[in-house]
Image (cartoon, rainbow, N blue to C red):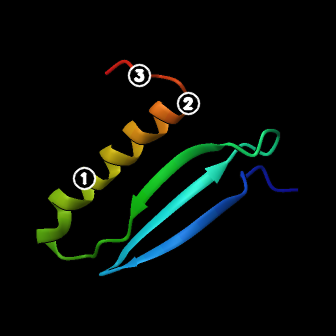
Amino acid sequence: MTNRRPSVNMDCGEGLIITVSFDPNTGKAHDVFLVGRGHKASDAPLNEALYEAGVRISKIIQGDYDD
């Protein structure tokens, strides 16, 4: 049996994939992941920014507004 939460993936084009996972008990959004921008070295700053945005969005969804 898997321990992963249900999730939805959205392909936004240009290599950007957004994944939203949901609490299996409440059905409410729980995490957001923004990934898949590319593999070139020049994509590294954008990948870091997307990762940090996903973490911050996830914390807000989970009720953690402190930053």
Mark 1: amino acid: Glu
Q: Is residue 60 left or right of residue 8?
A: left
Numbered badge on residue 26: none
- At x 34% / y 51%, what residue is drawn? 51
Q: Which of the 4 image quadrants contains residue 20? A: bottom right
Q: Quadrant of residue 17?
A: bottom left
Q: Work out whether 18 lies above or below 15.
A: above
In the image, is residue 63 above or below residue 33? above
> Where does label 1 land, which residue?
48
Q: Label 2 to label 3, Cα distance in Å?
A: 9 Å
Q: Position of residue 28 (x, y in %)?
A: 68, 42
Which residue is identified by label 3? Answer: 65
Q: Inspect the image, locate mark 3, and give the three-letter code of the amino acid beneath it.
A: Tyr
Horizontally, is 52 left or right of 43 in the view? right
Mark 2 to mark 1: distance in Å?
A: 21 Å
**Quarter of the picture holding the C terminus:** top left
Residue occupying image coordinates x 62% and y 65%: 8
Say which element carries label 3: loop
Residue 24 place in picture, x, y as percent:
79, 46
> Considering only order in the chain, which callout, 1 or 2, is on the residue closer to the N terminus?
1
**Residue at horizontal 47%, vertical 22%?**
64
10 Å crowding of disc 2: few (<14), some (14-19), many (20+): few
- Give the mark nearest the N terminus, 1 or 3: 1
Q: Quadrant of the N terminus?
A: bottom right
Q: What amino acid is at disc 2? A: Gln
Label 3 crowd (10 A; few <14 / some 14-19 / many >=20): few
In percent of the image, x 55 and y 45: which residue is there? Answer: 31
Mark 1 neighbour density, 10 Å: few (under 14) some (14–19) many (20 or more): few
Circle on res. 62? 2
Relative height, residue 57 to residue 62 (above, below): below
Q: Which is in the foreground here, disc 2 or disc 1?
A: 2
